[in-house]
Amino acid sequence: MKSSAEIRQSFMDFFASKQHTIVPSASLMPQSPGLLFTNAGMNQFVPYFLGTEKAPYSPPRAADTQKCIRAGGKHNDLEDVGYDTYHHTFFEMLGNWSFGNYFKKEAIEWGWELIVDVWGVPASRLYATVYAPSEGDPSSFDQEAYDFWAALFEKKGLDPKKHIINGNVKDNFWMMGETGPCGPCSELHVDLTPNGDSEGKLVNMDSDLCIEIWNLVFIQYNAEADGSFRDLPAKHVDTGMGFERACSLIQNTKGFTDFSQKPSNYATDVFQPIFRKLEALSGKTYADIYPESVESDKSQLSTEMKEAIAFRVIADHIRTLAFSLADGILLGNTGRNYVLRRILRRAVRYGRTLGFSSAQTFLPELVDTLVDEMAGVFPELKNRAAAIKENLQREEASFNETLDRGLAMFEEEVDGLKGQLSGEFAFKLYDTFGFPIDLTQLLCAERALKVDMDTFEKLMEQQRELGRKARTQQLVRAADIATEASTEFTGFEEDSSSATVLEIHTQ
Ligand code: ATP
Ligand code: MG
Ligand code: MG
Ligand code: MG
């Protein structure tokens, strides 16, 4: 069986052989304004697409594995994690790029060559999607992409009409965020049904029996802030393949020969070492079982299923947390920092499902396993391991101080309750016990309850208003101190109280 490290390397070797420069992953801290985290391989290349900088590679082609986080923002996969086999908050995106160099023909033919000829995925299990717009959409039917895929399927004796599927703007027009470089795309999906006979019916249906593996984007527009699309000075190729999905396909099908078991990203050597460590810490055993769908009624899950989900959520979240901390993104109360704090608190709550108590912090204990597995490719994990553990330790211990009391009060409140939890109570959990609202919503979903969000939002707005007033006073006081002594501005600290606070150190 090929290891994940070998699979990653085979991708790099393939594109190096096609004259691509192999570049390092960019930081998870995005360079483009408006993104919470780096969410795709193309993020670091935006200036080359816009034409404001020239790609420094000769020929102008690159390939890499990019650390991505999709929690919050335009691409938010947080709710699916643990419930399906193939969405994570943190994942690696393998990619190859052409900066005004090759275009659709090479992108499609090389994608096929790697997947079918090098890795050995049976062509009969592949579906390609092409962009087929409705009226008013920004681009026209992608006949070129259709023709290139059609020739490849035909060569294998397969009917292109059955294997090429029209896609709409939602699935086949890729955008990084509300603005930025974008374009029509063409994706490869793999049929994972035991007999490979789903006939394209499961493509883009949120089914883990047919998953999207690779997206080839033909970047030719910039989405402007006013909603219009401007032609870019040149045409580019931007591809992204989910690394964990590739590992799952190769490892869990005995090299594509046995599809009797549904492949899962969690059954690969990317996640298994974390599960082994979690098992050792918790005394529980991981089972690779999944609910019917991500929308499954959370109040009807068996204990066994809840534990399986908890294992997966924790293994996912520790990667997001550790990699973010390694890139210097801390946990805090606003923006991306609060997304991370929410993710940590969610993980700590799921830890209760595995029997961890407030007397025991478990997240820092997982860091060494991650370092052992991943530091070869991402040395920042090893270099920052001490700081990662220290931050996790502090944050987990701090939430442990209020989590159990909050959970006990929640149990009391929902005992016999039907319909919805009051916004006042959700706010109290937030304000007094540090429960992010999505955690309260999750707890409620597990009891078939909803949260009165209107009232919750009103109370939040009132609190923000009070905070704004208090901060104005604080700044006035700080200005007084500044005139009295020689001062040194040491920057904004994102990690304290309810908002960014101006720190003034008097000498
Ligand atoms: P999906 O439809 O499965 O949510 P996507 O269309 O949102 O994927 P793209 O934006 O096209 O994904 O990203 C390129 C590739 O990255 C996808 O084809 C997939 O293999 C992988 N990918 C996307 N989101 C995730 C995720 N949350 N976890 C793991 N891999 C992902
Ligand atoms: Mg998606
Ligand atoms: Mg998709
Ligand atoms: Mg896609």
Image: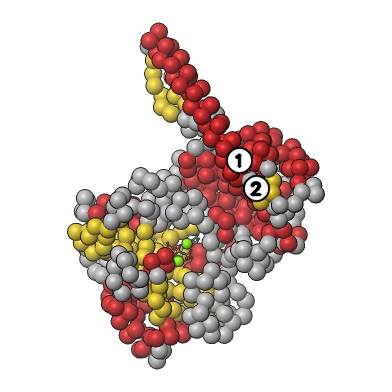
Against 485, residue 37 (above or below) is: below
Q: Residue at x 41, y 51 (%)?
A: 38
Q: Looking at the image, which residue sits at the far left?
A: 233
Q: Which residue is mark 2?
A: 451
What amino acid is at disc 1?
Phe
Q: CA distance from mark 2 to mark 1?
A: 8 Å
Query: Which image quarter holds the N terminus?
Result: bottom right
Q: Quick one: label 1, few (<14), some, or many (20+) residues within 10 Å?
A: some
Q: Is residue 250 visible?
A: no
Asked if ligand 1 lies within 8 A of label 2, the reply is no
CB under 8 Å between callouts 2 and 1?
yes
Element carrying mark 2: strand
Q: How far across and down, in percent of the image, does residue 489 sit?
A: 39, 21
Q: Give the residue pinned by disc 1.
A: 456
> Measuring 43% from the left and 12% from the top, which residue is drawn there?
481
The image quarter containing residue 83 is bottom right
Please tell me which residue lies in front, 474 or 483: 474
Q: Amino acid at mark 2?
A: Val
Q: Between residue 10 and residue 253, name the one nearer to us.
A: 253
Q: Quadrant of the C terminus?
A: top left
* Left or right: 16 in relation to 471: left
- Residue 106 lies, in percent from the top left, at 28, 74
Q: Quadrant of residue 400?
A: top right
Number of residue marks = 2
Q: SS at mark 1? A: helix
**378 sits left or right of 231 in the view:** right
- Horizontally, residue 438 falls left or right of residue 107, namely right
